[in-house]
Amino acid sequence: MNQKVESLKGRLIVSCQALPREPLHSSFIMGRMALAAKMGGAAGIRANTKEDILEIRSRVDLPLIGIVKRDYEDSEIYITPTMREVEELMEAGPEIIAVDATERLRPGGVTLDDFFRELKRTYPEQLYMADCSTVEEAVHADELGFDFIGTTLVGYTEQSAGDHIERDDFRILREILARVSHRVIAEGNIDTPQKARRVIELGAFSVVVGSIITRPQLITKAFAEALSEP
């Protein structure tokens, strides 16, 4: 694993993303957001779309986790669901490409196993991160050979409904860490510095923090709702 990726060990990755419906949707803005994250001490960036990644590359020299979010009518998977998205990302050259690694079928009825085999056959030198929602999915992704196992989708799928990554002192993360051999990146609802520090203490390779840093509309909403409570 290259030195740039090794620099993520024990450190913060900031997710700089804004979807088309969000007010900060702009590659230019995401580039500046990544620069602000670097100034604050971030060691890496997670970003969505080739365009955003290329802009971020022009602003910072940090290692990147790249994804493309795209909806397909025949699948619930939207994080790098097909080879089309992977090929777009390869044009931007992120150090790591993250894909949905849940048990759900991909567009066209493709299984994760078949998709990952195609990834490794087509781009064998690329590093891949598995975005998982359950311990079982994480173990399966580890067995397939993903370079990084992520807790990104815990609580966001039908099979993980009601779960929260921080519940019972990060029980799901601790179970994953005990059962996989590849590096684990903690991600999803890690919204305080204390939680970020805790997942590293538990053994996560790195931690991704997103909305609480880069989505001002959600940060504002939390404050506004607290003030409106009776």
Image (tube, rainbow, N blue to C red):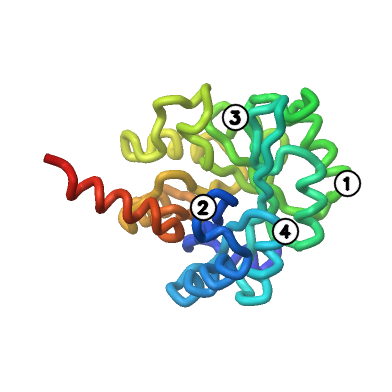
**Of all residues shown, which one is farthest toward the right?**
122
If you read the primary sequence from the N terminus, does the residue marked by circle 3 or circle 1 appear first?
1
Evaluate if marks 4 and 3 touch, with contact meaning CB atoms under 8 Å apart. Answer: no
Q: Nearer the viewer, mark 2 or mark 1?
A: 2
Q: Is residue 128 left or right of residue 150?
A: right
Q: Comparing marks 2 and 3, which lies closer to the viewer?
A: 2
Instruction: Measuring from the top left, give residue 156's x and y in whole percent.
Output: 50, 33
Instruction: Report which residue position mark 1 lands on.
Output: 122
Mark 2 or mark 3: whose residue is earlier in sequence: 2
Say the numbered circle drawn on residue 50. Answer: 4
Residue topped by disc 3: 137
Given contact means CB atoms under 8 Å apart, are the residues at marks 2 and 3 in contact?
A: no
Q: Is residue 115 above or below residue 119?
A: above
Q: CA distance from mark 3 to mark 1?
A: 23 Å
Q: CA distance from mark 2 to mark 3?
A: 30 Å
- Which is nearer the N-term, disc 2 or disc 1? 2
Q: Amino acid at mark 2?
A: Glu
Q: Secondary structure at mark 3?
A: helix
Q: Which residue is mark 2?
A: 22
Disc 2 to disc 1, how far (Cα)? 34 Å
Question: Could you tell me how far apart the alpha carbons at marks 4 and 2 are, in whole angstroms?
Answer: 18 Å
172 relative position to 168: left or right: right
Task: Give the image location of residue 133, x and y in percent.
Answer: 53, 33
Tell me where residue 226 appears, x and y as whole percent.
Answer: 20, 47
> Disc 4 or disc 2, which is closer to the eye?
2
**Secondary element type, mark 2:** loop
Residue 142 appears in the rendering: no
Q: What residue appears at the point 62 percent right and 47 percent down from the top-left corner?
A: 148
